[in-house]
Amino acid sequence: MLNDKIMLTPEEIYEKEFKVDARGYRPQEVDNFLDNVIKDYTEFLRIIKGLERELGSLTNENRELKNQIRKLQTELESQEGSNESAGVSNVDLLRRISQLEKFVYGKLK
């Protein structure tokens, strides 16, 4: 997902070598800093992969819940005629559908 925007990998950072001038930076400080950058990059990549897995799982769950809503709405619509003769009004059915949607979408706890 974000792979197009990430320019460096931890390995590329680790393998990067800088030219040394007479007035250059202290190599140990640069190495220590780059080690910290590598640790951060590795952790960021781990977090991103975990979030991508979670996103896939939640997307599938959302799809399943939407299918359940459609199925329940279809069942309610098909039973509308028989329910009206039993004294159930359209208002009662609409309330039930509304409650089911709130439950499925997590707005009712």
Image (cartoon, rainbow, N blue to C red):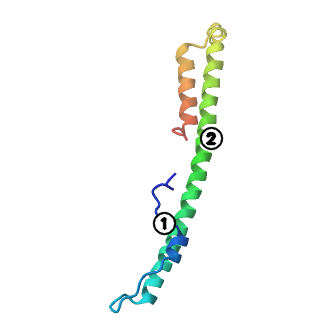
Of the pair 54 and 87, the residue shown nearer to us = 54
* Drawn side of residue 96 relative to residue 17, left or right: right
Which secondary structure lies at badge 1?
Answer: loop
- Residue 76 in the image, given as x and y percentages of width and height: 63, 18
Q: Which amino acid does label 1 sit on?
A: Leu
Residue identified by numbered label 2: 60
Residue 42, x across and y down, in percent: 55, 69
Residue at screen point 46% across, 63% down: 7
**As rendered, which of 14 and 58 lies closer to the eye?**
14
Q: Is mark 2 on a helix, strand or loop?
A: helix
In the rendered image, the vertical position of residue 48 relative to residue 58, given as above or below: below
The first of marks 2 and 1 along the sequence is 1
Position of residue 62 relative to residue 99, above or below, is below
Rendered residue at 45%/57% (across/down):
5
Residue situated in front as seen by the camera: 12 or 21: 21
Identity of the residue furthest to the left in this view: 23
Judge by depth and name the residue closer to the eye, 11 or 95.
11
Could you tell me how many numbered marks the image carries? 2
Residue 103 picture quarter:
top right
Q: How far apart are marks 2 and 1 (CA)?
A: 31 Å
Q: In which quarter of the image is the C terminus?
A: top right
Number of residues whose C-alpha sits closer than 10 Å to that of mark 1, classed few (under 14), some (14–19) or many (20 or more): few
* Residue found farthest to the bottom: 22
Q: Name the residue under label 1.
A: 8
Picture coordinates of residue 71 (x, y %)?
A: 65, 24
22 in relation to 35, above or below: below
**Which residue is rendered at x = 57% and y = 24% of the image?**
96
Residue at x 57% of width, y 48% of height: 55
Q: Position of residue 25 (x, y in %)?
A: 37, 87
- Residue type pointed to by label 2: Asn
